């Protein structure tokens, strides 16, 4: 059982529910939780397909056209399409039925905006964990933030604990460990060779998108993404074997 | 004259292909598409396009610092090759570009042109400073659990795993961490 880093006990966790999951925050200034919560709720209200009144749901129903959508929605869609291109279509903002589904980037964008808002407020030390996607900030005078990577075959255990060091201060994990089912690849319909993929990156959107893409695209995508992006990856194969980039190897 | 100018202007683009070669496949794709579209266009336009290709290479490079330097090197190479293209006069054939020195090593390509169309592009030098082929080895490799960076017992503040639902959170390690100490 992992334990809370003693150096951060003065910074108790604050939680709230949004986007179908729970956000856990550690903040120097507990009053800033409202700021973060406001950011998440705004993204959720605009982009959640399970909210019938969201702007994206209205587009999905055809009530409004994409050209009539808000600037922020079109910017978000453009970003998702950009990532679709960068991953050769493995990451896609389109559901099988053609509906635009931006859930693959929205949570990460909310984390990024909330983090930027905390920084703008003058807060140097914080961590945001939204459903397992983690972004941290720390100045030199503070201890490192460390993140535990859950074991997909036993979610009460960790397979690694990794300090989130500059510049890789974001991590996202993709997989279906909670239910243990196969993940089907986007490319040819074969099962993914990975049960779980964690990507460490400088920003949470890159981490989140590439974790999803590598699960969906398999080893080909894994190798392409580790070559092209400044990321570290820890992948768990179906048989439990681990694959890791050099940066995640124990250095001592 | 024009065919030769186009061919040598194309060399400028091809220099970028060489740099893209080192920076990643997407960079190559971007450069090649620009190369294909640069035939028949003015030299000035080619320089602009290849500079864009350098920027594209920068975007897709692994390390931002390396990428910025590579973009600058690519832009320099493009400008130099375009300048030599402007002085050129000859027919179709195989043209060898100058050796361009970048921080990633020397780069040189040859391009075979017939009637203003590129038939073949051959990298002659794509090496790093040490003379070996460039190794972009951030590849994930099999690893034992005991080899992973930090020990199981290390103290953590956050857990990353496949996204849990609001209900699943209550059973999660993150929930245990969040309530620890209270």
Image (tube, coloured by chain):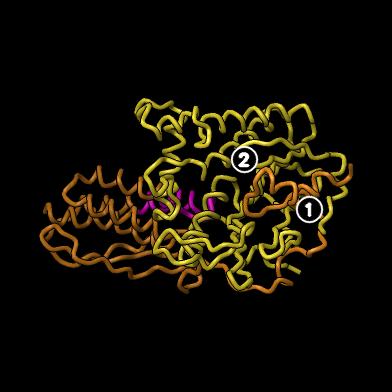
Chain colours: A yellow, B orange
Residue A151, image x and y in percent?
69, 62
Nearer the observer, A33 or A59: A59
Which residue is the site of mark 1? Answer: B156
Q: Residue at x 73, y 53 (%)?
A: A147
Which residue is the site of mark 2? Answer: A20
Q: Residue at x 67, y 31 (%)?
A: A36
Q: Is residue A182 above or below residue A47?
A: below
Residue A124, image x and y in percent?
74, 36
Q: Quadrant of residue A38 in the image? A: top right
Element class at badge 2: loop
The answer to whether A86 appears left or right of A41 in the picture is: left
Q: Is residue B102 above or below residue B182?
A: below
Residue A110, image x and y in percent?
59, 36
Q: Quadrant of residue B1 in the image? A: bottom left
Disc assigned to residue A201: none
Q: Residue at x 66, y 62 (%)?
A: A152
Q: Is residue B177 visible?
A: yes
Element class at badge 1: loop
Nearer the observer, A101 or B108: A101
Residue B167 in magenta stretch: no
Which chain letter matches label 1? Answer: B
Which region shows up in magenta? B57-77
Residue B71 in magenta stretch: yes
The answer to whether A72 appears left or right of B84 in the picture is: right
Residue B140, image x and y in percent?
57, 68
Task: Tell me the distance, in whole angstroms, between the alpha carbons under discs 1 and 2.
Answer: 24 Å
Q: Is residue B62 above or below residue A19?
A: below
Q: Residues within 10 Å of mark 2 (few under 14, many from 20)?
A: some
Q: Quadrant of the C terminus of chain B?
A: top right
Which chain letter matches label 2? Answer: A
- Total labels drawn: 2
């Amino acid at each position: 059982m992992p334990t809370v880093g003693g150096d951060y006990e003065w910074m108790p966790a604050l939680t709230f529910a949004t986007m179908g999951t729970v956000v856990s925050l550690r903040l120097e200034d507990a009053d800033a939780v409202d700021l973060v919560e406001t950011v998440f709720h705004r993204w959720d209200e605009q982009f959640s397909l399970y909210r019938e009144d969201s702007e994206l749901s209205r587009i999905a129903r055809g009530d409004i056209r994409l050209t009539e959508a808000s600037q922020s929605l079109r910017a978000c869609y453009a970003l998702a399409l950009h990532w679709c291109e960068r991953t050769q279509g493995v990451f896609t903002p389109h559901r099988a039925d053609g509906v635009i589904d931006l859930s693959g980037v929205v949570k990460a964008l909310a984390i990024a905006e909330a983090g930027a808002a905390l920084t703008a407020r003058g807060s140097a030390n914080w961590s945001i964990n939204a459903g397992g996607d983690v972004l941290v900030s720390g100045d030199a005078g503070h201890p490192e933030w460390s993140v535990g990577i859950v074991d997909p075959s036993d979610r009460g255990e960790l397979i690694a604990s990794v300090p989130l060091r500059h510049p890789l201060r974001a991590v996202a994990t993709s997989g279906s460990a909670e239910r243990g089912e196969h993940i089907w690849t986007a490319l040819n319909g074969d099962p993914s060779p990975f049960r779980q993929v964690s990507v460490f990156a400088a920003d949470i959107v890159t981490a989140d998108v590439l974790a999803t893409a590598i699960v969906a695209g398999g080893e080909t995508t894994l190798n392409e993404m580790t070559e092209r992006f400044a990321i570290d990856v820890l992948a768990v194969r179906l048989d439990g074997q681990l694959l890791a980039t050099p940066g995640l190897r124990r250095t001592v | 004259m024009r065919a030769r100018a186009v061919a040598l202007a194309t060399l400028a683009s091809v220099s970028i292909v060489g740099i893209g070669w080192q920076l990643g496949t997407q960079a190559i794709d971007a450069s090649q598409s620009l190369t294909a579209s640069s035939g028949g266009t003015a030299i000035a336009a080619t320089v602009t396009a290849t500079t864009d290709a350098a920027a594209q290479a920068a975007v897709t490079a692994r390390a931002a610092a390396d990428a910025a330097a590579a973009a600058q090197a690519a832009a320099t190479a493009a400008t130099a090759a375009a300048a030599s293209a402007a002085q050129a006069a000859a027919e179709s054939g195989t043209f060898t570009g100058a050796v361009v020195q970048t921080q990633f090593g020397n780069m040189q390509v040859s391009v075979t042109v017939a009637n203003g169309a590129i038939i073949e592009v051959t990298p002659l030098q794509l090496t790093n400073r040490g003379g070996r082929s460039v190794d972009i080895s951030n590849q994930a490799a099999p690893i034992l659990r005991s080899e992973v960076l930090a020990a199981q017992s290390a103290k953590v503040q956050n857990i990353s795993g496949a996204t849990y639902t609001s209900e699943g959170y209550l059973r999660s390690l993150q929930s245990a961490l969040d309530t620890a100490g209270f």
